Image: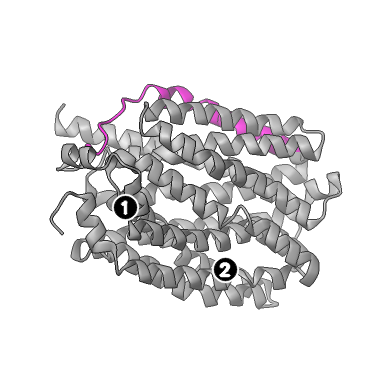
Amino acid sequence: MNASFAEKSSRYVLFLFISINLLNYIDRQVLYAVFPLVQVEFGLTDVALGFLGSAFMICYMVSAPTLGWIGDRLNRVKLASLGLVLWSLSTSFASFATSFRALFLARMAVGIGEASFGTVSPGLLSDYFPKEKRGWILSCFYMAIPVGSALGYILGGFIGQEFGWKMVFLVAGIPGLLLVFPLWFLKEPVRGGTSKLCTEITQVGTDYVSLIKNRSFITNTFTMAAMTFAMGGMAQWVPTFLNRIHGLNLATGNMYFGAVTVLAGIAGTMAGGWLGDRLQRKSAKGYLIISGWGFFIGAPIAAYALMTPSIIACLVTMFFAEFFLFLNTGPLNAVIINVTYPSVRAMAFAVNIFFIHALGDAISPVILGWFSDLWGLRNALLITPFAILMAAFLCFLCRCFIEKDTKRAEGLPL
């Protein structure tokens, strides 16, 4: 295989994975765009609505370790393909739900499907590219988070208002089925294939106990958990916040928040990947530096966005808050790859998925919903900036361990 063909093949894989991840986040977020409609139809409290939002995350995180174990042993491409089928069909079936329980079960199935893809896709994608490009490549891949989320809000708000919330799930679920075959027929790359010490690393790193002893991996995971608590809670409740506090109708509120999210998300994610790779060439702490400062700067801006009575000031500062928060997307995921052995990366991402959601957005919707019923939605959301500051502290703490763990993962002398 010549270099030109290999490069084109890698670009095709990246484009395919970005497309699938885009649908991943559209299917994940459309529910939050129609929260008010679902709440009215089933007569739900904010707590019950929060549980509905958590159904996806609970199954996503609980199934991740098992799927990660499978991903480290069997064909990762096939596992990702089956996950794509399951979550696309489950999203479509949600359009036929006639009760809270049926919709809850459909969202649980979506979580299992997306976990099949989420546990193997970062490591799988990294095997097509060299180490020095990981921050940028993963930033491109995770750019689907803001873009897919924004499309989920915009499409969900528009279709939900015009045609009802059930049509939203049908429209969101079908496109994923069109990408099943292109994914299924991808060639499985060699695990750690872009690492110079691939063979030695794979032989050394077959024990999952290495993850427990890896202080960088553990600290980075808790950093991402604090971030996920804040951003997940805001993602689920801000559209409702704009409707309830600022009086925007469903379509307008989702359109504004979607536009802010996609612009800030793309700019922040791409900037984080580019800056992270540049800093990483100078120091093993580069990815953590850019992420930590992003959290530290973004926290007070997010607090102001929630407190200001002006809708214009709210949206403008929300843009800057999201920009600084999205700086971490590629870098922190690149840290996971850099400090773990290729043979356990699927499990590493599975463990990471479990804890960041168990301590993050699996519980934050319910917690924020509970506090919203007690204090009001604005006061409940003000919890999130404190979680972002905690993420900044943990990110800076992780810098104490990163150099040694990176060398260990690469098989270099400590």
Q: Residues within 10 Å of mark 1 (few under 14, many from 20)?
A: many
In the figure, is residue 398 to the left or right of 159? Answer: left
Colour scheme in the image? one colour
Q: Quadrant of residue 302?
A: bottom right
The magenta stretch spans which residues? 166-193
The answer to whether residue 58 is visible is yes
Residue occupied by mark 2: 318
The answer to which of 51 and 314 lies nearer the viewer is 51
Residue occupied by mark 1: 136
The verdict on residue 410 being magenta is no
Q: Quadrant of residue 79?
A: top left
Instruction: From the top left corner, tell me how far across and down residue 368 is, in percent.
Output: 69, 63
Residue at image point 77% right, 33% down: 97
The quadrant in which the C terminus is found is bottom left
**Which amino acid type is marked by label 2?**
Met
Q: Residues within 10 Å of mark 2 (few under 14, many from 20)?
A: many
In the figure, is residue 224 to the left or right of 211? Answer: right
**SS assignment at label 1:** helix
The answer to whether residue 23 is visible is no
The quadrant in which the N terminus is found is top left
Residue at image point 59% right, 44% down: 28
**Which amino acid type is marked by label 1?**
Trp
